Image: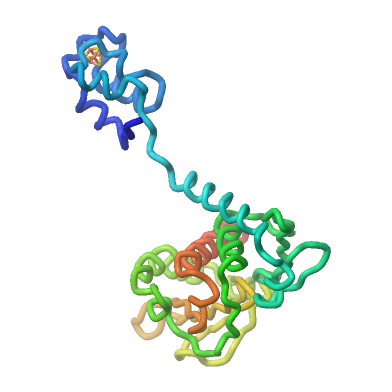
Amino acid sequence: MPQIQNAMEVFKLLDKSNCRLCEEATCLAFAAAVFKGNRKITECPHLEPEVAARYSDGVDQPRTMDQDAEEALRRMQGEIAKVDLAEAAERLGGRHANGKLTLRILGKEFSVDSQGRFATDIHVHGWIAGPVLAYILSGAGKAPSGNWVPLRELKGGKDWHRFFSQRCEKPMKAVADTYTDLFEDMVHLFNGQRVGQHFDADIAVVLHPLPKLPLLVCYWKPDEGMPSDLNLFFDDTAAANLAIEAIYTLGAGMALMFERIAQRHG
Ligand code: SF4
């Protein structure tokens, strides 16, 4: 079936006479109804014969990002059945008991069974489920070296650092600027550790979104006309333990989570 991306693509195929034989007010209204799946394009009697033939079986709607993410998640859940969870627990810094692999995610326990089903006290979002499964399926389990680097210095990070800055660092900085309890929450709610001077930051907190994937959050307060700033740093082994796309997903999800917490409590 041919795929259409928007109502204008349908409109371009029509006669555009607004004759109303289809009982819609205009050709554009008809195009919108076709795009939504409420009408068939072949209900227009003025279609060119080759267009009518091409679209006689209807049209496919474009896939949404949510559909793609859901499909990827199902695929990864299916692959978990092939994983030795006991070996994975040892490799990834988790533990294995009662047929489940348990990892600590931001200080909370998160278990996965051999069917890829989750058991946890935290609400499971796609942003956490996808990276956790990716970590289990392909994480090398490299021990962190203690050498902090920005995302752009990780393998593949150059392609992602602009998105990462927009979707992770900027939103987190906006939260830190207005919600003064953010760093206390990181320590108390998410088992973060305040650490000493890193990159001359005023505040530095280390979080563990995954056992072998520490994340350093550095915040610089505004000072003498200089605006505040916030940057995230990863251990230089991060890309071996989690694919760069999954690191991005995790970071964007954490930014979203901190925004929600600040809205609720700020
Ligand atoms: S029947 Fe076809 S040409 Fe006429 S208004 Fe509907 S879409 Fe337009």
Residue shown at 73% from the left, 58% from the top: 113
Depth check: give the residue in front, 240 or 193.
Answer: 240
Please tell me which residue lies in front, 98 or 67. 98
**Residue shown at the point (49%, 44%) measured from the top left:** 67
x and y, in percent, of residue 147 in the image: 50, 90
Extreme front residue here? 82
Q: Is residue 130 above or below residue 190?
A: above
Quadrant of the snapshot with the C terminus: bottom right
The x, y position of residue 222, in whole percent, is 42, 80
Rendering coords of residue 81 (x, y %): 67, 57
With 260 as the anchor, is 6 left or right in this view? left
Where does ligand 1 appear, by image quarter? Answer: top left
Quadrant of the image containing the N terminus: top left
Number of numbered discs visible in the structure rendering: 0
Q: Residue at x 29, y 10 (%)?
A: 22
Q: In the visual, does 21 lie left or right of 138?
A: left
Vertical side of 258 occupied by 16: above or below: above
Is any part of residue 258 visible from this angle?
A: no
* Residue 5 position (above or below residue 104): above
Instruction: Specify whether residue 3 is in view.
Output: yes
Is the image coloured rainbow, by chain, by secondary structure, or in one colour? Answer: rainbow
x%, y% of residue 137? Answer: 59, 65
Which residue does the image show at 43% across and 43% down from the upper left? 64
Residue 101 sits in quarter = bottom right
Picture quadrant where residue 220 is located: bottom left
Q: Is residue 121 above or below residue 74?
A: below
